[in-house]
Image (spheres, grey):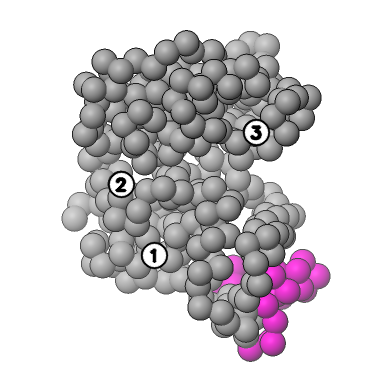
Amino acid sequence: MSNHRSVVINGDLGSGKSTVSVELSKRLGLRRISVGDMYREMAQRRGMTALQLNLHAELDDAIDSAVDNLQSEIAQSGEQLIVDSRLAWFFFHEAFKVHLITEPNEAARRVLARPHSEVENYASMAEAKRELHSRSESERMRFLTRYGADKYRLRNYDLVADSTRANPDQVVSAVQAAFEGRLGAEILRERAPLLLLDPMRVYPTREIDFADETLAQELAGAAPGDLEPLTIGHSGQDYYVIDGHRRLSAAVQNGFHLVPGLLLAENEESVTNRLSANDYFRAHVTSAVIEAWDRVHKIELPVPAHNPPEVHAGKQ
């Protein structure tokens, strides 16, 4: 293998980081390190849950220092590795950086299905979802405070992949293909990150009256690498298509789990001279646009959490 970079994988809790990193380690023949396992062991030794240790770490700088110093030492060793860690992308400067995302309810379902332990033990979906969100926000604030590093900023990564409906084999295969230069090479080289999104979780930005069944038939059976990337905006935790509605529609009709995308702008970055990614999202992802898309494709997109409620009056 000519690519001598390490692969570091982070992402949402319940997004499949462990599963993907274990299988990728096997396929690439590289040693795997899990910082999450180290952290859970530390919590167990202290008689804490992972969330309790996260909250304690906000007050005790020594906890993060120990874990982060270890990551920094590993990064400086020069060994090519697969690293499962929510902050390794910050320490492994030359690594191939993968960020996994998943829908919060699906993440909670996965975590709830794991064997209970003293470190992670949830009584219900609602509790799991609430605790996962709290842990994620706790980590994000520590990273921002300590390093000024925002794990939600997509441009920190080479590849962003949605594991909501894609199975582990699909995700691992996509990560490996991108790492080896067989998928999205031009975007990775010039305009990273490459996005691999679930088309059922991408919002339209204009009303459509009908689905293009001809294009859907032409693309039936296509792999992510065969599709022209969508042009994507990102606001909060939501993704929306700026250019490529017909291709997105075809992907939805075909039941594709992943479609490639090019990130045009995120959050306060500009989509147009007048509108940031956040502003564009609020202006164009309206209730009328969503309802038309839902009606044509016989699906139901959730009301975007990042949008003001008044934009979606009647769909609360």
In what element is the residue under mark 2?
helix
Q: CA distance from mark 3 to mark 1?
A: 30 Å
Residue 44 shows in the view = yes
Residue 244 shows in the view = no
**Residue 140 % position (x, y):** 67, 54
**Residue 240 % position (x, y):** 53, 27
Sequence-wise, the earlier of marks 2 and 1 is 1
Q: Quadrant of residue 17?
A: bottom left
Which residue in the protein does label 3 denote?
303
In what element is the residue under mark 1?
helix
Helix, strand or loop: magenta stretch: helix
Q: Which residues are magenta?
A: 45-72
The amino acid type, in three-letter code, at marker 1 is: Thr
Give the side of residue 13 with respect to residue 16, left or right: right
Which residue in the protein does label 1 denote?
19
Q: Which of the two discs, 3 and 1, sits closer to the camera?
A: 3
The amino acid type, in three-letter code, at marker 2 is: Ala
Given residues 60 and 69, the one toward you in this image is 60
